[in-house]
Amino acid sequence: LAGCRMVFGNSGTEAINTAFPQVFEIPFNSNAKWMLTIHAIGEGLGKEEAVGMGATAEAGFVAVLKGAPERVLDYCVLDTAMRTRVENSLAQLMSEGKRVLCLAERHIVGLEPDFVFSGCTPEDANFPMDSFTLRGLVALE
């Protein structure tokens, strides 16, 4: 959140947390090498305001997957050319001695607003754990 506060300020960060509250989490573990959070989309906002903050026009949830690129990329839909570009970027960053995290998201629609998420692995999750959209790589010094 520190980075968000630098970009958006305290009130902007609070507005984002209010607009997209976390409703579920699969914590990081060393076997999976990723973690997942699910956020309600635009809760408490008007449609235009929610879309302006990055929501889709359709209500629902967004699952955010973050972790080791070699694990997160397996959940993403990538064509061969994009996969090659990502792997080349990853190799370059790692050759510079950087630790790299991968971020991906997936919108989940068609569920009731009070849907209760459960599960701790892709195999036992009661929500889709495929077809994520790659959002980027983050390199840490």
Image (spheres, grey):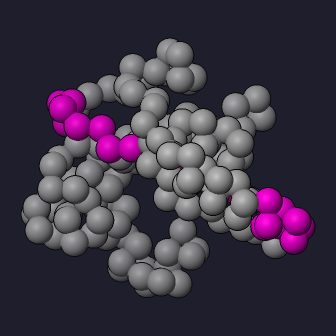
Is 92 magenta? The answer is yes
Tell me if residue 130 comes above or below residue 81 in the rendering.
above
Q: Which residues are magenta?
A: 91-113
x and y percent of residue 4 in the render? 49, 75
Q: Quadrant of residue 60?
A: top left
Q: Quadrant of the N terminus?
A: bottom right
Q: Pick whichever, 111 or 86, lies toward us.
A: 86
Q: Position of residue 67 (x, y in %)?
A: 66, 47
Residue at 20%, 65% (x, y): give it: 51
Query: Residue 108: percent from the left, percent from the top?
Result: 30, 38
Q: Residue at x 29, y 65 (%)?
A: 54
- From the viewer's perspective, is 31 left or right of 64? right
Along the horizontal axis of the image, is 13 left or right of 81? left
Q: Which residue is located at x 11 percent, y 68 percent?
A: 48
Establish if 17 lies above or below 79: below
Quick check: is 27 in the magenta stretch? no
Q: Residue furthest front?
A: 81
